[in-house]
Image: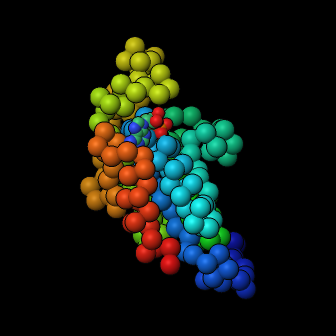
Protein backbone atom coordinates (compact mmCIF):
# COMPACT_ATOMS: atom_id res chain seq x y z
CA UNK A 1 0.00 0.00 0.00
CA UNK A 2 1.31 3.45 -0.96
CA UNK A 3 2.86 5.48 1.85
CA UNK A 4 2.76 2.56 4.27
CA UNK A 5 6.40 1.88 4.99
CA UNK A 6 7.05 -0.93 7.46
CA UNK A 7 9.26 -0.18 10.41
CA UNK A 8 12.11 -2.59 11.05
CA UNK A 9 11.63 -3.98 14.55
CA UNK A 10 14.67 -5.34 16.31
CA UNK A 11 13.14 -8.49 17.85
CA UNK A 12 12.80 -11.19 15.21
CA UNK A 13 10.47 -14.13 14.91
CA UNK A 14 13.45 -16.45 15.49
CA UNK A 15 14.19 -14.71 18.80
CA UNK A 16 10.57 -15.02 19.89
CA UNK A 17 10.60 -18.72 18.98
CA UNK A 18 13.75 -19.19 21.04
CA UNK A 19 12.09 -17.54 24.02
CA UNK A 20 8.97 -19.71 23.56
CA UNK A 21 11.16 -22.81 23.04
CA UNK A 22 9.09 -23.93 20.05
CA UNK A 23 8.01 -22.72 16.62
CA UNK A 24 4.69 -21.07 15.90
CA UNK A 25 2.36 -22.25 13.13
CA UNK A 26 -1.30 -22.54 12.20
CA UNK A 27 -3.28 -25.79 12.45
CA UNK A 28 -6.39 -25.34 10.33
CA UNK A 29 -9.35 -27.70 10.92
CA UNK A 30 -11.81 -27.89 8.03
CA UNK A 31 -14.93 -30.04 7.72
CA UNK A 32 -18.71 -30.05 7.90
CA UNK A 33 -20.60 -28.54 10.82
CA UNK A 34 -20.72 -31.18 13.56
CA UNK A 35 -17.81 -33.14 12.08
CA UNK A 36 -15.81 -32.68 15.29
CA UNK A 37 -13.46 -29.79 14.45
CA UNK A 38 -13.96 -27.84 17.69
CA UNK A 39 -13.95 -30.96 19.86
CA UNK A 40 -10.68 -32.21 18.36
CA UNK A 41 -9.03 -28.75 18.18
CA UNK A 42 -9.87 -28.25 21.85
CA UNK A 43 -8.41 -31.66 22.81
CA UNK A 44 -5.27 -31.00 20.72
CA UNK A 45 -4.84 -27.60 22.40
CA UNK A 46 -5.12 -29.26 25.81
CA UNK A 47 -2.48 -31.85 24.88
CA UNK A 48 -0.13 -29.13 23.57
CA UNK A 49 -0.70 -26.96 26.64
CA UNK A 50 0.27 -29.88 28.86
CA UNK A 51 3.55 -30.13 26.93
CA UNK A 52 4.28 -26.47 27.68
CA UNK A 53 3.38 -25.23 24.20
CA UNK A 54 1.90 -21.72 23.88
CA UNK A 55 -1.41 -21.95 22.03
CA UNK A 56 -4.56 -20.10 21.07
CA UNK A 57 -7.78 -21.29 19.42
CA UNK A 58 -9.76 -19.25 16.92
CA UNK A 59 -13.26 -20.43 16.12
CA UNK A 60 -16.59 -19.15 14.90
CA UNK A 61 -17.68 -18.14 18.37
CA UNK A 62 -14.77 -15.91 19.37
CA UNK A 63 -14.30 -14.45 15.89
CA UNK A 64 -17.87 -13.94 14.66
CA UNK A 65 -18.84 -12.31 17.96
CA UNK A 66 -15.97 -9.82 18.01
CA UNK A 67 -13.60 -8.98 15.17
CA UNK A 68 -16.09 -10.10 12.49
CA UNK A 69 -19.41 -9.15 14.07
CA UNK A 70 -20.17 -6.86 11.13
CA UNK A 71 -20.01 -9.71 8.60
CA UNK A 72 -22.89 -11.82 7.24
CA UNK A 73 -22.82 -15.17 5.43
CA UNK A 74 -22.96 -13.62 1.94
CA UNK A 75 -20.19 -14.76 -0.42
CA UNK A 76 -18.29 -11.42 -0.11
CA UNK A 77 -18.55 -11.42 3.66
CA UNK A 78 -17.51 -15.08 3.93
CA UNK A 79 -14.40 -14.17 1.95
CA UNK A 80 -13.68 -11.19 4.23
CA UNK A 81 -14.32 -13.41 7.28
CA UNK A 82 -11.64 -15.84 6.12
CA UNK A 83 -9.22 -13.08 5.14
CA UNK A 84 -9.38 -11.46 8.58
CA UNK A 85 -9.03 -14.82 10.37
CA UNK A 86 -5.97 -15.64 8.28
CA UNK A 87 -4.38 -12.22 8.91
CA UNK A 88 -5.01 -12.48 12.65
CA UNK A 89 -3.66 -16.05 12.70
CA UNK A 90 -0.61 -14.82 10.79
CA UNK A 91 0.16 -12.19 13.44
CA UNK A 92 -0.32 -14.77 16.20
CA UNK A 93 1.97 -17.25 14.43
CA UNK A 94 4.55 -14.50 14.00
CA UNK A 95 4.28 -13.79 17.72
CA UNK A 96 5.29 -17.42 18.35
CA UNK A 97 1.98 -19.15 19.10
CA UNK A 98 0.65 -22.44 17.83
CA UNK A 99 -2.76 -21.32 16.56
CA UNK A 100 -5.61 -23.78 16.18
CA UNK A 101 -8.44 -22.66 13.91
CA UNK A 102 -11.72 -24.54 13.52
CA UNK A 103 -13.87 -23.26 10.66
CA UNK A 104 -16.05 -25.11 8.14
CA UNK A 105 -14.11 -23.24 5.40
CA UNK A 106 -15.83 -25.12 2.57
CA UNK A 107 -14.03 -23.52 -0.38
CA UNK A 108 -10.69 -24.72 -1.71
CA UNK A 109 -9.79 -21.24 -2.93
CA UNK A 110 -10.29 -19.79 0.57
CA UNK A 111 -8.08 -22.42 2.19
CA UNK A 112 -5.44 -21.77 -0.47
CA UNK A 113 -5.54 -18.07 0.39
CA UNK A 114 -5.08 -18.78 4.09
CA UNK A 115 -2.07 -20.92 3.24
CA UNK A 116 -0.64 -18.07 1.13
CA UNK A 117 -1.18 -15.52 3.92
CA UNK A 118 0.56 -17.55 6.65
CA UNK A 119 3.01 -19.29 4.31
CA UNK A 120 3.02 -22.96 3.32
CA UNK A 121 5.64 -23.86 5.95
CA UNK A 122 3.43 -22.44 8.71
CA UNK A 123 0.20 -24.16 7.68
CA UNK A 124 -1.06 -27.61 8.70
CA UNK A 125 -4.39 -28.64 7.21
CA UNK A 126 -6.52 -31.12 9.17
CA UNK A 127 -9.53 -32.43 7.27
CA UNK A 128 -12.16 -33.70 9.72
CA UNK A 129 -13.84 -35.99 7.22
CA UNK A 130 -16.88 -37.23 9.11
CA UNK A 131 -19.65 -38.39 6.72
CA UNK A 132 -22.53 -35.96 6.25
CA UNK A 133 -25.04 -38.57 7.48
CA UNK A 134 -23.20 -38.80 10.80
CA UNK A 135 -22.90 -35.00 11.17
CA UNK A 136 -26.61 -34.74 10.47
CA UNK A 137 -27.42 -37.52 12.94
CA UNK A 138 -25.43 -35.68 15.66
CA UNK A 139 -26.95 -32.32 14.70
CA UNK A 140 -25.13 -30.76 17.67
CA UNK A 141 -26.63 -27.30 17.13
CA UNK A 142 -29.93 -28.30 15.48
CA UNK A 143 -28.81 -26.57 12.31
CA UNK A 144 -29.20 -29.53 9.93
CA UNK A 145 -32.89 -29.88 10.89
CA UNK A 146 -33.38 -26.18 10.23
CA UNK A 147 -31.52 -26.36 6.92
CA UNK A 148 -33.61 -29.39 5.81
CA UNK A 149 -36.73 -27.45 6.74
CA UNK A 150 -35.56 -24.68 4.43
CA UNK A 151 -34.97 -22.25 7.27
CA UNK A 152 -31.25 -21.71 6.54
CA UNK A 153 -29.91 -20.68 3.17
CA UNK A 154 -26.45 -21.75 2.04
CA UNK A 155 -25.93 -24.37 4.72
CA UNK A 156 -22.80 -26.36 3.88
CA UNK A 157 -23.57 -30.00 3.05
CA UNK A 158 -27.30 -29.38 2.55
CA UNK A 159 -27.76 -26.50 0.14
CA UNK A 160 -24.19 -25.27 -0.25
CA UNK A 161 -21.16 -27.27 -1.37
CA UNK A 162 -18.23 -28.54 0.67
CA UNK A 163 -15.07 -28.83 -1.42
CA UNK A 164 -12.96 -31.53 0.23
CA UNK A 165 -9.20 -30.95 0.50
CA UNK A 166 -7.23 -33.11 -1.94
CA UNK A 167 -4.00 -33.28 0.01
CA UNK A 168 -4.64 -32.55 3.66
CA UNK A 169 -1.73 -33.03 6.08
CA UNK A 170 -4.04 -35.10 8.29
CA UNK A 171 -7.44 -36.67 7.60
CA UNK A 172 -9.68 -37.84 10.44
CA UNK A 173 -12.96 -39.72 10.14
CA UNK A 174 -14.53 -39.51 13.61
CA UNK A 175 -16.73 -42.54 12.90
CA UNK A 176 -13.50 -44.56 12.80
CA UNK A 177 -11.26 -42.91 15.40
CA UNK A 178 -11.93 -41.61 18.92
CA UNK A 179 -11.09 -38.07 20.02
CA UNK A 180 -8.05 -39.41 21.90
CA UNK A 181 -6.84 -41.27 18.80
CA UNK A 182 -7.35 -38.19 16.64
CA UNK A 183 -5.29 -36.14 19.10
CA UNK A 184 -2.42 -38.59 19.05
CA UNK A 185 -2.42 -38.73 15.21
CA UNK A 186 -2.35 -34.92 15.00
CA UNK A 187 0.26 -34.42 17.75
CA UNK A 188 2.53 -36.92 15.99
CA UNK A 189 2.22 -34.83 12.82
CA UNK A 190 3.02 -31.59 14.70
CA UNK A 191 6.02 -32.81 16.66
CA UNK A 192 8.65 -32.19 13.95
CA UNK A 193 7.21 -28.73 13.27
CA UNK A 194 7.44 -27.70 16.91
CA UNK A 195 11.20 -28.17 17.27
P1 LIG B 1 -17.68 -28.82 14.57
O1 LIG B 1 -16.75 -27.96 15.37
O2 LIG B 1 -16.99 -29.56 13.46
O3 LIG B 1 -18.94 -28.17 14.15
P2 LIG B 1 -18.20 -30.07 17.14
O4 LIG B 1 -16.84 -30.41 17.65
O5 LIG B 1 -18.88 -28.84 17.65
O6 LIG B 1 -18.12 -30.04 15.53
O7 LIG B 1 -19.21 -31.28 17.36
C1 LIG B 1 -18.87 -32.61 17.08
C2 LIG B 1 -19.74 -33.53 17.93
O8 LIG B 1 -19.41 -34.88 17.61
C3 LIG B 1 -19.51 -33.34 19.42
O9 LIG B 1 -20.75 -33.40 20.07
C4 LIG B 1 -18.64 -34.56 19.79
O10 LIG B 1 -18.81 -34.96 21.12
C5 LIG B 1 -19.15 -35.61 18.80
N1 LIG B 1 -18.19 -36.68 18.51
C6 LIG B 1 -18.44 -38.00 18.59
N2 LIG B 1 -17.34 -38.74 18.28
C7 LIG B 1 -16.36 -37.86 18.00
C8 LIG B 1 -15.00 -38.01 17.63
N3 LIG B 1 -14.42 -39.21 17.46
N4 LIG B 1 -14.28 -36.88 17.39
C9 LIG B 1 -14.85 -35.65 17.53
N5 LIG B 1 -16.13 -35.44 17.89
C10 LIG B 1 -16.90 -36.54 18.14
Report the number of discs.
Answer: 0
Q: Is residue 83 visible?
A: no
Determine the residue positioned at 50% across, 73% down.
Answer: 194
Which residue occupies 70% across, 72% down? 3
- Spot the residue most to the left: 166
Q: Is residue 176 left or right of residue 104?
A: left
Q: State the image coordinates of residue 48 (x, y, percent, origin top left).
A: 55, 62
Whole-percent x and y of residue 12?
Answer: 66, 83
Q: Could you say which quadrant of the image residue 123 lies in?
A: bottom left
Q: Nearer the viewer, residue 183 or 170?
A: 183
- Tell me: residue 105, above or below residue 33: below
Residue at 36% over, 26% down: 136
In depth, the one of 70 and 195 nearer the eye is 195
Question: As displayed, is residue 148 above or below residue 116?
Answer: above
Coloration of the structure image: rainbow
In the rendered view of the protein, which quadrant contains the N terminus? Answer: bottom right
Q: For residue 54, which quarter of the picture?
A: bottom right
Q: Position of residue 92 (x, y in %)?
A: 63, 64
Front one among 56 and 30 = 56
The answer to whether one can see residue 158 in this image is: yes
Quadrant observed for ligand 1 in the rendered image: top left
Above or below, 168 against 6 in this view is above
Front one among 119 and 93 = 93
- Residue at 47% in and 22% down: 142
Find residue 43 and report its horizontal and vertical position in percent: 51, 50
Amino acid sequence: MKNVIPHTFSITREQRNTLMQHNGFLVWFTGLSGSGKSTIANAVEKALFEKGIHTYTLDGDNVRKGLNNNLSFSPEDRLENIRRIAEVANLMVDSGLVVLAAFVSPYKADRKRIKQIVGTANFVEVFVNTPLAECERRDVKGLYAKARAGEIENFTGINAPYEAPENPDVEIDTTKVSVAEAVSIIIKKLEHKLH
